[in-house]
Amino acid sequence: MKQKNISIPFTEYSGEAELPENIKKLVVEAKKSAANAYAPYSKFKVGTAVLLANGKIVTGNNQENSAYPSGLCAERVAIFYANAQYPNVAIKTIVIVAFQQNDEVEHPVYPCGACRQVILESQGKQTSPIKLFFISKEKIHSVENASYLLPLEFDKESLNR
Ligand code: THU
């Protein structure tokens, strides 16, 4: 028996001013999208901006439903839309921002487990890694590879074991 550990590298920025210019643009788009979220139940509005390899920016926001599980997170709305419109174009970067009662959150919000699974499926279809940025008022976190968000994942290889 052997004890093993997994650690993940991530970057912390002290604020939006520190971000590269192209990411700042994605933040603006993610915030605009969050404003259009349909979140009457949680009042937690999430916006996602997805930068594609063809330079297009696709955005999405959370869509809730009175039958709660029928709703969908911002990340999956944006990624599925990107995949539907541009099925063969790689995803380069995903930016996520959230507002609670219309106030930007003070700590970064990370994608839920189901969204991580979907992000990894996209990364598995392309050769380049997907970078993610989690925006908040206090600080910003970023990972260089979506795999860091879901170690020991279930993927298409798992189906052949
Ligand atoms: N939500 C997202 O859209 N993305 C996340 O990363 C976390 C949660 C949504 C789902 C639901 O509409 C609301 O936020 C509260 O969970």
Image (cartoon, rainbow, N blue to C red):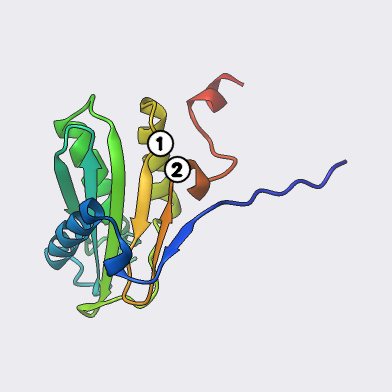
The residue carrying pointer 2 sits among few (fewer than 14), some (14 to 19) or many (20 or more) residues within 10 Å by Cα, namely some
Task: Give the mark, 1 or 2, whose residue is nearer the N terminus.
Answer: 1
Q: Amino acid at mark 1?
A: Pro
- Residue sitting at the far top: 160
Q: Is residue 28 above or below residue 89?
A: below
Residue in view at x 56 percent, y 19 percent: 160
Question: Which of 103/39 is in front?
Answer: 103
Q: Position of residue 142 (x, y in %)?
A: 41, 56
Secondary structure state at the residue bearing disc 1: loop
> Which mark identifies residue 145?
2
Where in the image, quadrant-wise, is ligand 1 located?
bottom left
Instruction: Determine which quarter of the picture holds residue 70.
Output: bottom left
- Rate crowding at label 1 as few (under 14), some (14 to 19) or many (20 or more) other CA atoms within 10 Å: some
The correct choice, above or below, for 38 with respect to 143 in the image is: below
Residue 129, disc: 1
Please tell me the numbered disc located at residue 146.
Answer: none
| CA distance for labels 1 and 2 | 5 Å
Q: Quadrant of residue 64?
A: bottom left
Q: What is the quadrant of the N terminus in the image?
A: top right
At mark 2, the secondary structure is loop
Relative to the observer, which residue lies in front, 67 or 36? 36
User: Which of the 4 quarters of the picture holds residue 47?
Assistant: bottom left
- Three-letter amino acid code at the position of disc 2: Asn
Q: Nearer the viewer, residue 62 or 30?
A: 30
Please give the name of the residue rendered at 21% of the width and 27% of the height, measured from the top-left corner. Answer: 87
Q: Give the percent coordinates (x, y) of residue 119.
A: 37, 42
Q: Give the image location of residue 115, x and y in percent.
A: 38, 49
Q: Are marks 1 and 2 in contact (CB under 8 Å)?
A: yes
Q: Residue at x 13, y 67 (%)?
A: 35
